[in-house]
Amino acid sequence: MFEVALGWLLLTGFIAFVLAGTLAPLETLFWWSRHTDTDLDPALAPASVPAVSSGDFIVYLGGIDRISGTSNSGRERRFLDALRKGAPDAVLVDTVFPYAASGNPLLHGPRVFSRVWRALDAAPAQQRRPLLANLVNARNFFQVLVSADRRYGPVFNLAIAGLIEDSLRAAGWQPRSGARLTLIGLSGGAQMAAGAADDLADIFDGPIQLISIGGVIASTPGLNRLARIHHLAGSADRVEAAGVLAFPARWPIAAGSEWAVARQSGRLQRIALPGVTHNGPRGYFGEARQGDHLQWQETVAIVLDCIAGFGPGTGSKSSG
């Protein structure tokens, strides 16, 4: 009986995986069909939200292992707590779920596979954790590909930019305030941030920078709108390296791509981290010893340096 139930669970998960890859753009198209009149409007701001005097806002977009905007891992929460302490004058937003155009968590809201996610979540822990984790990673990675796609990406990225804008307004950001915006993307979150930058630049009159931590990131038009791009890449990070292979526009032969132009202009800085992997003790948020610090502390220090250097006089936004 147990083997039969496990078999059906695995079969259901496999079918969901195949369908999720095939139908990945449909949620974006469904969002677009219901929001064709939606645009990012800098003139609208909720009167009930008090303005924030700070000139710095930070938005953190996590990796593909999340099921909601609040499902940060313990290591991510430690990293974010250190950021808050290291940049106390900045407003940090870390609740955006960038792997759905609607922003709805996988276990909530109307979506085609919501019953599958709930069934997997309700399964016994010993089967649920590895199976659910792998399927969530696969499902969200397909959304990264949608963001990078030249056909569906503009619609998907507009939706993500809207989610970021809403979260910033709720945190006190006001249009025409000249605020500086730092987008921090972990793994696939870096692509979501870069994709959204194209539309965010239309409403922000202050500069926008991207800090990519092991980012799986395509050469996307949003790179043209960023004042600075810091790309942290571990020398032992196979996931980040696979991202380079997956997007030919990032290859050295693609001299005219957005990635190449950003690098040639000096706006893109690659920060190499020797021996760092994508996850685990030697990962960006790991606890492996790096000289006098732990790796996660080193990552925090680098990110804080990037934020500190992004002060007044950084430069104007690049135009698309």
Image (tube, helix red, strand yellow):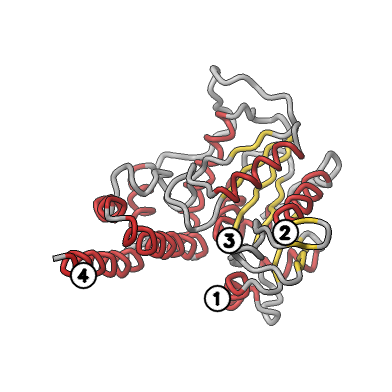
The total number of labels drawn is 4
Q: CA distance from mark 4 to mark 1?
A: 33 Å
Report the residue marked by disc 4: 7
Q: Residue at x 36, y 67 (%)?
A: 21
Question: Label 1 sits on what residue type?
Answer: Ala
Q: Nearer the viewer, mark 4 or mark 3?
A: 4
* Image quadrant in which the N terminus is located: bottom left
Mark 3–mark 2 contact, CB under 8 Å? Answer: no
Q: Residue at x 38, y 58 (%)?
A: 129
Q: Secondary structure at mark 3?
A: loop
Report the residue marked by disc 3: 187
Q: Nearer the viewer, mark 3 or mark 1?
A: 3
* Image quadrant in which the C terminus is located: bottom right
Question: Label 3 sits on what residue type?
Answer: Ser
Residue 246 - label:
1
Compare residues 271 and 46 and report the one nearer the observer: 271
Q: Secondary structure at mark 4?
A: helix
Q: CA distance from mark 3 to mark 2?
A: 17 Å
Q: Residue at x 35, y 64 (%)?
A: 131
Residue 295 - label:
2
Picture quadrant of residue 272? bottom right
